[in-house]
Image (cartoon, rainbow, N blue to C red):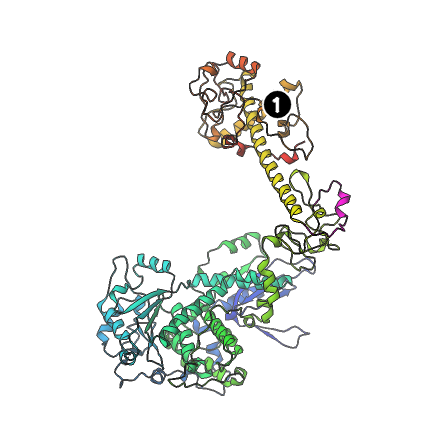
Amino acid sequence: MIFRSPGQKDEICILYPLIHTVERRPPTTDPKVWPLTIRCRDFNIYTFSVEIQDDATDVFNKIQKLTCIGSIKQVYAFEHMFEKKFPSSDGWSVYDVLQEYDRMGVDNATGSWRFSNVNRSYTFCATYPRILVVPAKISDNVLNHASKFRSKNRIPVLSYLHWHNKASITRSSQPMVGLKQNRSIQDEKLIEAIFRSNIKTLSERGSQSNLIIDARPTANAMVNVAMGAGTENVENYKNCERKFMGIDNIHVMRESLGKMVDVIHTADANGLPIKKHYLDKSGWLRHISTLLESALVIIKNVHIFGSHVLVHCSDGWDRTVQLTSISELCLDPYYRTFRGFQVLIEKEWVSFGHKFSDRSGHLSNEKYFINTASSTFNSVQSKFSKQSHVREISPVFHQFLDCVFQILSQFPTKFEFNENFLIKLHYHCYSCQFGTFLCNSEKERMDYKVTSETYSVWNYFNSHKEMFINPLYNEKANPNDNNDDCVLFPDEKIVKYWAGLFGKHDEELNGNNDEIREEKVEGFAARIRWRSNSPISRPASPNVNSIVDGNIWKDDTPSPSLPFNKHVKLYEDNPYYDPWKNNSNKMGNNNFHTVKDRSMSNEASTTKDKLTNNDFNTIKDRFMNNANSLARATISIGTSAYYNVTSLAKSNFDLGINETTSPVEITNNTETQNLREMESFSALSLSENSKNNNSVTSNSNVSTLFTESRSPRQSISTNFSSYTSFGRRESFPSLGIKPSSVPSSPSSRVNSPSSDPTSPLSSTSSRSNSLSKKFNSESKVSSPLSTPPISSPPATTELLKDLPHPLYNVDVFSSP
């Protein structure tokens, strides 16, 4: 897709395979245009504002039609073949399997390894290359039996032979162990032959234990056991040990990249700097560090200990290829040359069947096209629709290039190519302009005739080699056996975000030391402290525009309300003051004061005395007093609510309510039960107020629970005995309390709480005589709301367990 505006000199070209999502949004108001937002896989975002609605619909539909294709033969690479010629035309012959393994030292004369044609027609393993390198002692018949024990028939085969000690790196898929703990003698013989291939070289140094690397987390491997697969039982394999690397699967990696991209795009859309601690929440650098650390284990075992290493994950085409290619890049300086890196990618990624089409999403889906302009339903539906179309997509090759960038940053003189080479490789992995990264295996490329009908991507790079050469490169391509300096040991702790891939400067994503140090100290204190020069509005903090002359609150901005209507000013002159730390630059205690008048909230404090320990203790005591007062208020509220429930239950007898006339019925419908209880509660409350006060209140507010008026700052009394008696917890079925028949007299009840000195409701205070007489006179009346009254409540916090506070949401601070 090509776009050029009348006043713009350069054209904007967007390749359809690069399009990730297209969103058609509702029209704007002024001016009225219909925006189309296109997000690309190279992390660019384009927004086109179309002035006519029909044109916006037409463009949206045509982009969808041209992007969502049904076959890989429809990509531009097959048309590009006849339009442009490159000066370099040897791209498809960059990697020759016989020549490359011969360079490593594999030949039939040594007797340790051999080339096998068991997969020449891709019937042995559809995702492996035609030519495999296996131990010379293992016949093709053994390979056929061993393939049944490996997932997708991907048996252990040679990937790399180290130039220093002939230690090998082999790769495979997971074994089919299952819950029955299956084993294969042929597979065990094959791995034993691999581990004994350089026994003559190691005889002088002593034998070392060989290593089986399982790239997955341990839990993932155990889950695969239940599915019939799993990991090796090292008891069946001689002289080896197994290690789990803990690399997460493709779904975790996809979500991690999505979170990181969202942070970058959100900051760009709002014109704000990118915060590194927001990027860190994506976990992207943690995954990169895990890959480098796992590769370092392989590098040390191969080069230092001379051990053989077998690497696998689940199917052997994602995490496995990441570890083998990174390790070989560090072990062999040839792979760090411009030509050698092309060979490495062709050997490890292309020939061994990395699923480029699936992982890169070359065949798009209609679900990537979101039309939110037509209706709100479409917008909601697009957000909650199944994401099955992205299940196979994951940035596996992207992570490999990111790891290469990390090593290139740590060893800038060891690579012949530069960062721009890696960025262009990432671009063409999705562009579908060349056939190198099309299809999922070598067999598929042969079926689609990719090599004969498309250009290789290496034709492009080799034709423009001067653009991708590193001027700092000074490494030798062919080391001698005594040169250990050519082996790289990357530091997994020194990693940074690949800013160039996102079109950013390094400081934008990684920041300088001062910014990073400042972000590390931000946390709880950052929610309290507010600096007037901060460009970002934190949640629950004042807006940037509301900061005037160093003060947070303007005249028209309400000051923060704290318990008991107290207003506290966090700071006046020192914007970096944190009351929860021992700050070196503290302010006077007068900055923490009560504001009685709104006009006083704008008075600037001029005192800058340092806060002493006594002043700090005073502040702490005030905070604790407020917390204690709030706790006491909660107890009093629950006590009063319980008292009101009991009083209303007793008033049933005053109103002559019985079972036949009660508005509350015992029913199995919980919702109806709750509703009728609350209706009864409201009606009886009005009647009770009418009897006691000889007046009817229009609004029965919960504030009538308090018998006397008090100021907002007056502490709430904790004398529970000042309230009248409590009822027994047998009144409300909605609380799980079953109604029971009322005994003739409280004193005759065997299980009465007042008669039991150990009961939490026992008390020594007497009941109201009037209520007692009325209760005794109506003791034979049984109502769902009837509750035998008991003595006044005890002054104990254990009563909180029995308070029915979930029914009543009382705000003590709004009470008179």
Q: Is residue 280 above or below residue 714?
A: below
Is the N terminus in the top left, top right, bottom left or bottom right quadrant? bottom right
Task: Give the magenta range.
Answer: 592-611
Residue 493 is situated, as x and y percent measured from the top left of the image, at 48, 68
Viewer-side residue, 367 vs 760: 760
**Left or right: residue 776 compared with residue 228:** right
Q: Is residue 70 visible in the rendered structure shown here?
A: no
Residue 335 is situated, as x and y percent measured from the top left of the image, at 43, 80
The crowding category of the residue bearing disc 1, from other C-alpha atoms within 10 Å (few below 14, some 14 to 19, many at least 20), is: some
Q: Is residue 652 inside the magenta stretch?
A: no
Q: Is residue 28 above or below residue 617?
A: below
Q: Is residue 491 above or below residue 603?
A: below
Q: Is residue 608 inside the magenta stretch?
A: yes
- Give the residue at x 54% y 33%: 805
Residue 630 is situated, as x and y percent measured from the top left of the image, at 60, 37
Label 1 sits on a secondary structure element that is: helix
**Left or right: residue 793 compared with residue 191:** right
Q: Main secondary structure of the magenta part?
A: loop
Viewer-side residue, 772 vs 731: 772
Residue 362 is situated, as x and y percent measured from the top left of the image, at 46, 69
Is the C terminus in the top left, top right, bottom left or bottom right quadrant? top right
- As drawn, the residue found furthest toward the bottom would be 87
**Left or right: residue 372 compared with residue 139:** right
Viewer-side residue, 220 vs 141: 220
- Give the residue at x 51% y 61%: 282
Count of labels in the image: 1
Tell me the amino acid under the disc marked 1: Leu
Tag 1 residue: 686
Q: Is residue 397 visible in the rendered structure shown here?
A: yes
Q: Is residue 671 above or below residue 722?
A: below
